[in-house]
Amino acid sequence: MKHTMETDRASMLDRLADPTLLDAAVVVPVGETDGVVRCRLAVPVGGGRLAGYLTVEDYAEALTVLTMLDGRSGFPHVRVRETVAPRDSRRTIIWGEDPPESDALARWRFYGYSDKAVARVREGEQTSGHPPAGLDTN
């Protein structure tokens, strides 16, 4: 599934313990497809949300996100996750604290997910052995 600002908003609304963080989210234009500007939604830290991230299609999109978020309130320590992939590969921009090395459930709470969202993760892990698809945070 291609992520858009609308799909980002809907998925985060369903996950966040504090959905009011979406009021301070930043719309980031990351590219253009068939003459239409593609945008993503970057959700700030706050309350129990200690960090966030946004994965984009390539290095150019990553630079756009970095430029828009750097120095902005709610987006501390913006950086690109290290990778050895080619420049035209997907990139992940992260902000806030570094995620814990502990189990996945601790990471979901770290990203400010609600108990309901964490329960869905737990349920998915019990049935499949890994978190449900689509629970990649931003």
Image: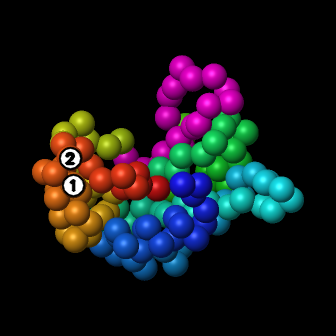
Q: How many marks?
A: 2
Which residue lies under the disc numbered 2? 128
Question: Residue 76 location in percent, x, y?
Answer: 49, 52
Looking at the rendered structure, the secondary structure element under dot 2 is helix
In this view, which residue lies farthest toward the right? 35
Highlighted magenta segment, given as a residue range:
81-97
Give me the disc on residue 124. 1
Q: Is the C-beta separation of discs 2 and 1 under 8 Å? A: yes
Q: Residue at x 54, y 20 (%)?
A: 84
Specify whether residue 95 is painted magenta. yes
Q: Is residue 76 visible?
A: no
Main SS of the magenta part reads loop
Q: Residues within 10 Å of mark 2 (few under 14, many from 20)?
A: few
Q: Quadrant of the N terminus?
A: bottom right
Q: Residue at x 57, y 23 (%)?
A: 85
Task: Give whichever of 70, 15 is nearer the camera.
Answer: 15
Looking at the rendered structure, the secondary structure element under dot 1 is helix
Q: Residues within 10 Å of mark 1 (few under 14, many from 20)?
A: some
Specify whether residue 94 is painted magenta. yes
Question: Residue 137 location in percent, x, y?
Answer: 41, 54
Is 61 above or below relative to 84? below
**Taking 23 as reference, is 100 left or right?**
left
Give me the disc on residue 115. none
Is 75 above or below relative to 25? above
Q: Residue at x 60, y 66 (%)?
A: 5
In this view, which residue lies farthest toward the left? 126
Is 110 above or below relative to 86? below
Task: Give whichever of 2, 138 is nearer the camera.
Answer: 2
What type is the residue that disc 2 sits on? Ser
Q: CA gap, disc 2 to disc 1?
A: 6 Å
